[in-house]
Amino acid sequence: MRIAHTMLRVTDLERSLRFYEEALGMRLLRRNDYPAGRFTLAFVGYGDERIEAVLELTHNWDTQAYERGTAFGHVAIEVPDAEAACEAVLAAGGRVTRPAGPMKHGHTVIAFVADPDGYAIEFVQRPNPPSP
């Protein structure tokens, strides 16, 4: 077993695709329109979805807004440099909600950004490998 994908409902698919591709460096893996159901599914990620977990962006054509529940926390992305990842998001017009720095009560460097619909994305900085 493995995690295949996480689904996020988005209000503007093109805006969300720009964010995930340009600000986060993901690729559009596949996109399917379902006119009879009036929705589109777009899968984005960093690699082959048969091997790696991806995000499913669901756009319901007739829905203008969603209420995010309090149970959902965030999507975490491992990055080599959290500060540089935040700079890329800002350069793409995105929003940093917590700048890069050590987590409270720990040493791991993290940062948070928000996608166009306000979903939290956490950057977790990959630790430097030990010196030989």
Image (spheres, grey):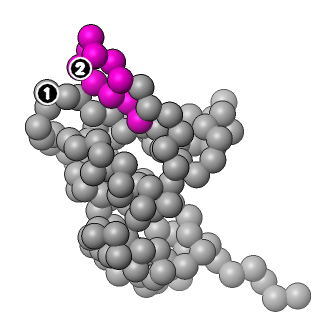
Tell me where residue 123 appears, x and y as whole percent: 46, 68
Amino acid tagged 2:
Arg
2 and 1 marks in contact (CB < 8 Å): yes
Q: Residues within 10 Å of mark 1 (few under 14, many from 20)?
A: few
Residue 124 seen from this side:
yes
- Principal SS element in the magenta part? strand
Q: Position of residue 82 (x, y in %)?
A: 49, 77
In-front residue for pair 102/114: 114
Q: Residues within 10 Å of mark 2 (few under 14, many from 20)?
A: few
**Quarter in which the N terminus is drawn:** top right
Residue drawn 50% across and 34% down? Answer: 30
Relative to 45, 72 lies left or right = left
* Residue 103 image-quadrant placement: bottom left
Residue identified by numbered label 1: 62
Along the viewing direction, whichever of 35 and 131 lies nearer the viewer: 35
Residue drawn at x 27%, y 33% as measured from the top left = 59
Magenta stretch: give its range: 33-42
**Is residue 32 in the magenta section?**
no
For the residue pair 113 and 44, the one nearer the viewer reads as 44
Q: Quadrant of the C terminus?
A: bottom right
Q: Earlier in the sequence, mark 2 or mark 1?
A: 2
Q: Nearer the viewer, residue 126 or 102?
A: 126
Amino acid at circle 1: Asp
The residue that disc 2 covers is 38
Residue drawn at x 49%, y 44% as measured from the top left: 28
